[in-house]
Structure formats: C-alpha cells, structure tokens
Image (tube, rainbow, N blue to C red):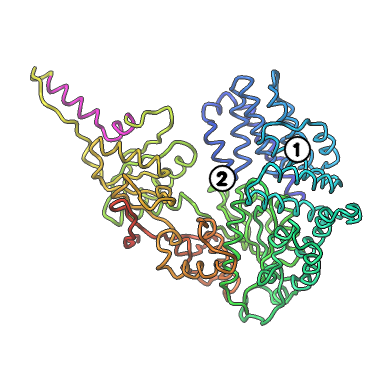
C-alpha cells in the first residue's frame, strides 16, 4: 500500500512540474471557475494543477493567491510534500492575509505529512487571526494538530473556542463530532489519553474517557460495548460528547447493530467465501468523508446507507462500519477495513481516491462512489462504480430526443468544465443514435447571451438577406427576423436560474416553441413553482419526481424513520440508499454472471459487464409552472 501511495505522489509531483514547464501553453486554457468546480467535485489533484497553472501567468499578488489555493487542494488530496514544495514558491510582496494563510498551510502540510510535533511548533507561533473565517480555520487546525502531537487538553480547549464563535446547533454538533474523532484517532495510533490529566474537571475527563470508547466501538462488537457506553453516559449524562459518541459509534438502540452484530442465520448461496461470512468481524466497510470540508456530503450518504440497512432482511444483512476518509489516506483506510474483517467495501467518493482504490487491486469487492475517468479503464477484478453522473443524464436526453422522433438539435450550456463534459457526452450519444447536433454553444461571463443565441439560430443570416434584398431592389422593406428552420429540439443543460434566463432570451428570438430538453439541474427543488420553463422535458431520479409511486422511494421513506425524518434530505441521501441496495445485490448473487436489475431511488439500476452501474431515470415536463410526470420513451 505504501508503494502505491508513493507512486501516486510521484505522479502528482511530475504533473505539477509539467504544469510549471507548460505555462505558456496551458495558462490560456485554465480558468478559476473550472478550478473551483474541480475542487467542489473532490477532484483535488486536478484542481491543484489548475490553480498552479493559473499562478504561472498572473501578477504577483494574484499568483500568490492561486498558489495558496493550489496548496490547499494538494492538502485536501493528502499530499503534504507537494503542498510544502509549492508554498515555498510564493514571491514578495506577500500581503498580511496571504502571510497568515501561508503559515497555516505550512503547519497543515507538516501535519498531513505526519510531522505532528513540527506542525505544533509552527501553529503555536501564529497569532490568532481576528477575521472569523480565518479564526475558525486556525482553531480547527490547531485542535487537530494539538491532539495529534500529544496535547489532548489543548485540543479540547481549542474546540471550546470554536464552539464560542459558532452558535448554530448544527455547527456545534459538527465541532463535537470532529473533536471526538480527533481523540479517537489518537487512541488508534497508540496514544494514552489518561483521564487523570483532567484532574477534577468532569468536562475534560468526559472527553478523555469517551475517546477509547469510540475507538473500541469501531473495532469490537457493538453489543459488547453497550455496557461501557451506558456506564459512561450515567457518569456524564449531559456531556456534549453524548451525541458525538452516538454518531461515531452508532451505539444507541437499533444503531448498535450497524457497528457489528452477531450472525443470526447463515444466508444461502452467498457468492463470497463462507469463512469470511462466518467471521464474527465480517462487515460492510464504508469509506466516506465524515469530517472536514466534505462532511455534509458524507453524512447524507451515511444516512442513506443506514436507511438501506434498516430496510434489508435482518437474516441476511451485514453490519455497516464507517471509515472516515478525511482523517487518513485511502490506502490506509483500505488496509484498516480489510484487516478488521470487511467482506465488501462501499466507497471511496473522491475521484483521486477512486483511482487509488482501483490501483490497489485488492481482492475484496469494492463499489466506488464515483466513476473512473474514461482515459483510465478498469483493470482490477471485483471493482464496481456507481455515480450520479451528469454525463449519463446527457446521454439519456440524447436517446430520449431520438425516441421522440427529433434528430437535429442545438445545445446551449453554461461555460466551464462541467458544461464541456456534458455537451461532449450528449453529442457523442446523439451521433451514435443517428442524430445530429447542428450547433453547440457554451455561454460564459464574457459572452453576451443574446449574441450567442442569434449566432446559433442564424438570426444574422436573416438580417443579411434582408439587407441584400433591399439593396438589390432599392426599396425599404418591412422585416421581421427569422431563425433557422431545421431545428427539431434544443438541449439546455444548466442550473435553474441560468436556464430560466436562457429560455426568456430564446422566446425573444422566436425559439420559444422549439421542443426543449434539459438535465435534472434545471429543477428548483426549493420551490413548487417552476416559472418561465414551460415545455421543458427533463430527467431526474424517482426520489425527486415520483416519491409516492416508486417502490424504492416508498421503502426509503419508511426506512428513514429509523434514523429520523427524511425531510430535507437530498439526492446524496438517495444515492447512499441505492449504494446499499447494489452492494447487497452483488454480495448475495449466486454467480458473477447473474444480471442485476433494481428499482432504486435514483433510477432503475443495472450493472454492465465493466462493473459500471447504469441508471434509467424518470421523465417529467414543466407544464403551467409545475412538474408533471410523463411516460418514458427511452429505448
């Protein structure tokens, strides 16, 4: 595993050096919007390189900002050495804010690289910032570094400081969970958190006693921990670690069985080896981020997976055990889960983590929660991929248009990497299905949307014909511009606000009556009224469109009552639920050649020969400013 990690680090550094040497060519192609999108989509290595490229052609102050952002992405990808090397390249003048960020990132790079003592020395030399956002960042890092360096009481003190400036209940819950996780990891690494260090302070003593309980809850059978957890709760009934311990160890009520449960009945015809199935530690490992910047996505996935667990047959299901990928490298998480008895792995989520997991080529089956890049075909056995892919939605729209008898189309998309990828997938699928994309346009901030539309619809051609005719006849003729008449449909993959503005402009240029298709991004889930989008046909998951009709979504709503209401839970909640369904189907099939077909909350799910999960979505049309389901014509 360490060899694999070193190979990936070496590759990352080569890419970094390549980006530096190719500044003259690449800088024109890079843009901050794409870098931010890559970061948001957890493609941290790609985001780091994008920011690195941007820094090469920017003026000093802005270049330093880009280098700091690039270093931040290297650290998000757990590449401390790459971040350290980059931070040394900042050039004067460096502003006060940049200097503070530089110092924070330098300390974090030491911590990520495993040099906790050095990181502690660096961060204690930093004057706490006054700006709230930076102060939060400073305290969060100082908390983790303090505990990792053996200063547990100092770490708890920093968590208290964070609580004092973050009063929202959700924020306080996250801070307490992060603190317990930092303490748990310290125990796992062999640190002795002696409760006597707290003296008579019950608050501090409660945290120090909770840490080994959290560590044991992950490693040992849950029910054997129940007595210790209850005894701790009796000693500290109102302690803030109560909720955090429940969330991490899942030790309350029915959630006890999610950590580990006794084998009640051996299921028949299980594909995987029976000796693993009979192991007291056999479990389904879930590798997702539960702390840090991606914790919100991880929590929604976790809750969906737990809902799937509760909806499963108790005689067949296996306990879930969660591994936080934000706290350690993916190769370590894989090793920990396999040593602990994982018979199936769900995750990881980030694109670079999925690449590393596939490269590990382990024997334990993996259901990755993202797709490998097209240029990186799967080679590992027992490696499956499941994602909420906008490219797959675009391909479904292309097939739908052809099925509706519409072959020739024009596409408008928002500029950036996302729009480019969606348009490419749509164009390829349309062409392979016998259609033709007459024109495609990406609309960016520096392009006037009316000019783009007029160009695609050839409004200028109409005006030019009118001018030529007037000049030929020598007369002033009445005129109304006309658009091209060879268009069967429009495709507008874009967020709701962008698509609404685009539709208004299209109507102005005589294209409002052309049949229009879109991806699920067009839907404004916060409002029942979808104004100015009438006539648009789009695809989306049953969890969103037909909650009361689809069998899987009914089951999901029922199961969600076991972990609290599902109200407000989004697509990632449904994604987690379906991930559970898929692993159960893969694990319980009698032959590797069995076809898998499931009615999931994110669509009708099948697994192709390459291990990719394919989704068939529901279809809807916006009619009278509201959404109505329509029958699927997709072939």
Measuring 74% from the left and 31% from the top, which residue is drawn there?
Answer: 85
Q: Is residue 318 above or below residue 46?
A: below
How far from the left and from the top, in percent, is residue 615?
46, 60
Q: Main secondary structure of the magenta part?
A: helix
Q: Can residue 192 be seen from the camera position used here?
A: no
244 or 433, which is in the foreground? 244
Q: Residues within 10 Å of mark 1 (few under 14, many from 20)?
A: many
Q: Residues within 10 Å of mark 2 (few under 14, many from 20)?
A: some
Q: Which mark is residue 109?
A: 1
Quarter of the image with the C terminus in it: bottom left
Q: Can residue 551 be seen from the camera position used here?
A: yes
How far from the left and from the top, in percent, is residue 357?
66, 54
287 or 497, which is in the foreground? 497
> In the displayed structure, does residue 74 sit left or right of residue 489?
right
> In the displayed structure, does residue 315 sit left or right of residue 536?
right
Measuring 36% from the left and 39% from the top, which residue is drawn there?
Answer: 412
Find disc 2 in the rendering and name its residue: 41
Q: Which mark is residue 626?
A: none
> In the displayed structure, does residue 308 sit left or right of residue 434?
right
Q: Is residue 582 magenta?
A: no
Q: Magenta segment range?
A: 451-470
């Amino acid at each position: 595993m360490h060899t694999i990690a070193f190979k990936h680090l070496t590759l990352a550094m080569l890419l970094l050096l390549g980006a530096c040497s190719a500044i003259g060519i690449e800088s024109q192609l890079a843009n901050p919007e794409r870098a931010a999108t890559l970061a948001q989509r957890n493609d941290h290595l790609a985001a780091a390189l994008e920011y690195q490229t941007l820094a090469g052609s920017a003026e000093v102050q802005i270049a330093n900002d880009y280098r700091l952002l690039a270093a931040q992405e290297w650290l998000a990808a757990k590449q401390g050495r790459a971040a350290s090397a980059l931070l040394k390249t900042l050039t004067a003048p460096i502003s006060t804010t940049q200097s503070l960020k530089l110092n924070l990132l330098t300390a974090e790079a030491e911590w990520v690289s495993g040099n906790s003592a050095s990181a502690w020395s660096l961060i204690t030399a930093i004057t706490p910032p006054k700006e709230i956002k930076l102060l939060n960042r400073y305290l969060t890092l100082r908390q983790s570094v303090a505990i990792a360096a053996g200063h547990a009481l100092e770490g708890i003190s920093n968590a208290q400081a964070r609580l004092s400036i973050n009063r929202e209940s959700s924020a306080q819950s996250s801070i307490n969970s992060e603190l317990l996780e930092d303490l748990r990891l310290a125990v796992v690494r062999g640190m002795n958190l002696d409760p006597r260090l707290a003296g008579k302070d019950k608050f501090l003593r409660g945290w120090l006693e909770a840490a080994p309980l959290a560590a044991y809850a992950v490693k040992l059978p849950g029910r054997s921990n129940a007595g210790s957890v209850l005894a701790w709760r009796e000693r500290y009934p109102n302690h803030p670690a109560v909720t955090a311990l429940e969330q991490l160890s899942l030790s309350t009520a029915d959630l006890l069985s999610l950590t580990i449960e006794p084998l009640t009945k051996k299921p028949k015809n299980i594909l995987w080896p029976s000796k693993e199935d009979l192991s007291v530690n056999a479990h389904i490992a879930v590798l997702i981020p539960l702390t840090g910047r991606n914790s919100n996505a991880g929590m929604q996935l976790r809750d969906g997976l737990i809902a799937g667990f509760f909806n499963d047959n108790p005689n067949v299901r296996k306990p879930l055990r969660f591994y936080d990928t934000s706290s350690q490298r993916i190769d370590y998480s894989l090793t920990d889960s396999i040593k602990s008895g994982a018979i199936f792995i769900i995750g990881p989520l980030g694109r670079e983590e999925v690449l590393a997991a596939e490269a590990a080529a382990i024997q334990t089956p993996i259901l990755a929660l993202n797709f490998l890049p097209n240029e990186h075909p799967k080679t590992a056995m027992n490696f499956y991929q499941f994602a909420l892919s906008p490219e797959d939605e675009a391909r479904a729209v292309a097939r739908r248009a052809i099925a509706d008898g519409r072959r020739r189309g024009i596409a408008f998309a928002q500029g950036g990497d996302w729009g480019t990828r969606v348009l490419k997938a749509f164009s390829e699928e349309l062409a392979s299905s016998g259609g033709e994309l007459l024109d495609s346009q990406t609309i960016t901030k520096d392009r006037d949307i009316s000019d783009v539309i007029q160009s695609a619809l050839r409004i200028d051609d109409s005006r030019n014909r009118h001018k030529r005719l007037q000049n030929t006849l020598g007369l002033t003729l009445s005129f109304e511009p006309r658009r091209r008449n060879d268009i069967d449909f429009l495709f507008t993959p874009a967020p709701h606000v962008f698509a609404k503005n685009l539709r208004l402009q299209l109507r102005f240029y005589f294209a409002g009556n052309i049949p229009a298709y879109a991806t699920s991004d067009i839907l404004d889930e916060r409002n029942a009224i979808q104004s100015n989008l009438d006539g648009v046909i789009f695809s989306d998951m049953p969890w969103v469109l037909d909650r009361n009709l689809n069998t899987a979504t009914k089951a999901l709503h029922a199961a969600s009552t076991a972990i609290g209401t599902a109200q407000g839970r989004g697509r990632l909640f449904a994604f987690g639920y379906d991930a559970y369904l898929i692993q159960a189907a893969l694990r319980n099939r009698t032959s590797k050649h069995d076809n898998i077909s499931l009615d999931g909350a994110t669509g009708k799910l099948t697994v192709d020969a390459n291990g990719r999960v394919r989704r068939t979505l529901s279809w809807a049309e916006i009619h009278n400013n509201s959404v109505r389901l329509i029958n699927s014509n997709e072939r």
